[in-house]
Image: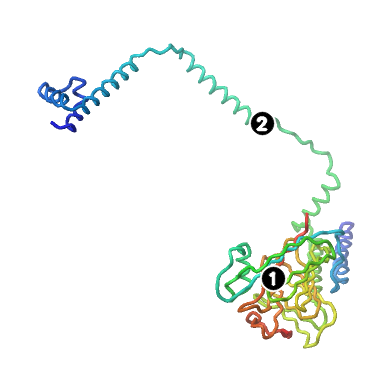
């Protein structure tokens, strides 16, 4: 019997669970193997320690009130939660005997928009239409004479000055998406960038012969210098 | 009857007021609204080329650059300048192509737009841009690409 076989049998050998013939073989092998003897001693110490631990006495603990305490704690938390979700109170709003001026104006406008007053509603609609027309008309006239700004999508703001050099300050409002404005060399121009649609705005200044060309589709009346 | 008359008066007011407001439109920029305003104007000088990729230093502008400059895929940062300017103050920056950029904070107009005056190589323009807005000036050739100037203007708080 070699050491490996002995080591596998040490536990049952120590506990006296081996067949007598096998136990005798183990004992014979142990006598000739110091390493196996050391392992048997270690096994014996471990067995003693475990036995002492299982048989040791511990102080008495009174567990009689644990269950009642836990149940009481749960009940208290439930009660607290119920209280926090309770409605503290309901406010009652007294109704006035007669509606105030603000209420009456509000009622009148609500009737107006529900078309319960057709004549008045028609007049209001005409006023809104006139306002929209006024805004549109004013917008179409905002560019300076001799200057046409055409913003497409995608487009280039074309500034057509019939080839004449402008000597005065003008304003170009660029509001269409992806519209770029070109500013001539030597001219002062006020350009408004309305980036409400988050599209990038580029102020181009292209000089001929520098290898940079305008984006495709541009054929403005203003040449690069 | 009384309510109809009130309605007619309100309608007349609605018609007259917008007309009066727009009749006064002119090409002049609106008067400065805020006195002693201060603006932070950041300028990034970018070299745009038709090949290559976007410099990591320009990660924040990558999407806008590729959208704004179709045909250009390479963007590298050449220089950067940050200036805090009061009204009328100007700041100069020498560009990689040897030109000089000068920009001035004109002020804030009535509509809340910041006015920035730019002068670079003979181009003079005044730009009205929203607080915190970004715009580009581009088109001057440099090496095998072009110079792009990215401006960001915001009111100093």
The residue positioned farthest toward the left in the image shown:
A21
Depth check, front residue: B119 or B24: B119
Horizontally, residue A161 falls left or right of residue A80, namely right
Taking depth in this image into account, of B19 and B34 the one nearest to the observer is B34
State which quadrant residue A195 falls in.
bottom right
> x%, y% of residue A182?
73, 78
Query: Where residue A167 sits in the image (x, y, percent)?
Result: 84, 82
Q: Secondary structure at mark 2?
A: loop
Q: Residue at x 40, y 13 (%)?
A: A58
x, y (%) of residue A210?
66, 83
Residue beneath disc 1: B149
Q: Determine whether A22 is above or below A193 in the image.
A: above
- Crowding at dot 1, Cα within 10 Å, few <14 / some 14-19 / many 20+, comes out as many
Which residue is label 2 attached to?
Answer: A87
| Chain ID, mark 2 | A
Determine if marks 1 and 2 fall on one subunit.
no
The quarter in which the N terminus of chain A is drawn is: top left
Quarter of the picture containing the C terminus of chain A is bottom right
Residue B131: name its quadrant.
bottom right
Which residue occupies the foreground of this view, B154 or A86? B154
């Amino acid at each position: 019997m070699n050491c490996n076989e002995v080591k596998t049998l040490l536990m049952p050998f120590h506990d006296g669970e081996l067949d007598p013939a096998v136990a005798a073989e183990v004992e014979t092998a142990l006598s000739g193997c110091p390493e196996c003897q050391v392992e048997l001693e270690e096994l014996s110490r471990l067995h003693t320690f475990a036995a002492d631990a299982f048989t040791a006495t511990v102080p008495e603990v009174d567990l009689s009130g644990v269950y009642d305490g836990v149940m009481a704690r749960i009940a208290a938390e439930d009660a607290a939660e119920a209280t926090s979700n309770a409605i503290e109170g309901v406010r009652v709003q007294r109704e006035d005997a007669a509606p105030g001026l603000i209420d009456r104006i509000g009622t009148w406008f609500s009737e107006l928009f529900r078309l319960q007053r057709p004549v008045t509603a028609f007049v209001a609609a005409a006023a809104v239409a006139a306002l929209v027309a006024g805004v549109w008309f004013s917008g179409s006239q905002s560019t300076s004479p001799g200057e046409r700004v055409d913003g497409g999508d995608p487009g280039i703001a074309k500034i057509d000055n019939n080839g004449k050099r402008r000597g005065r300050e003008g304003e170009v409002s660029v509001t269409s998406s992806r519209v770029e404005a070109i500013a001539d060399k030597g001219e002062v121009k006020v350009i408004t960038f309305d980036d409400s649609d988050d599209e990038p705005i580029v102020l181009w200044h292209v000089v001929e012969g520098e290898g940079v060309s305008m984006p495709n589709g541009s054929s403005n009346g203003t040449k690069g210098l | 009857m009384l309510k109809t008359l009130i309605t007619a008066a309100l309608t007349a007011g609605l018609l007259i007021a917008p007309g009066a407001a727009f009749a006064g439109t002119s090409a002049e920029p609106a008067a400065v609204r805020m006195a002693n305003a201060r603006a932070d104007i950041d300028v990034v000088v970018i070299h745009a080329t038709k090949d290559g990729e976007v410099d990591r230093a320009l990660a924040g502008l990558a999407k806008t650059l590729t959208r704004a400059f179709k045909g250009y895929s390479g963007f590298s940062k050449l220089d950067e300048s940050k200036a805090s300017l009061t009204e009328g103050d100007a700041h100069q920056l020498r560009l990689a192509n040897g030109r000089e950029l000068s920009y001035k904070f004109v002020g804030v107009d009535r509509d809340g737009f910041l006015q920035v005056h730019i002068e670079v190589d003979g181009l003079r323009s005044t730009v009205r841009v929203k607080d915190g807005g970004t715009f580009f000036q581009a088109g001057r050739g440099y090496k095998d690409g072009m110079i792009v100037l990215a401006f960001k203007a915001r009111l100093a708080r």
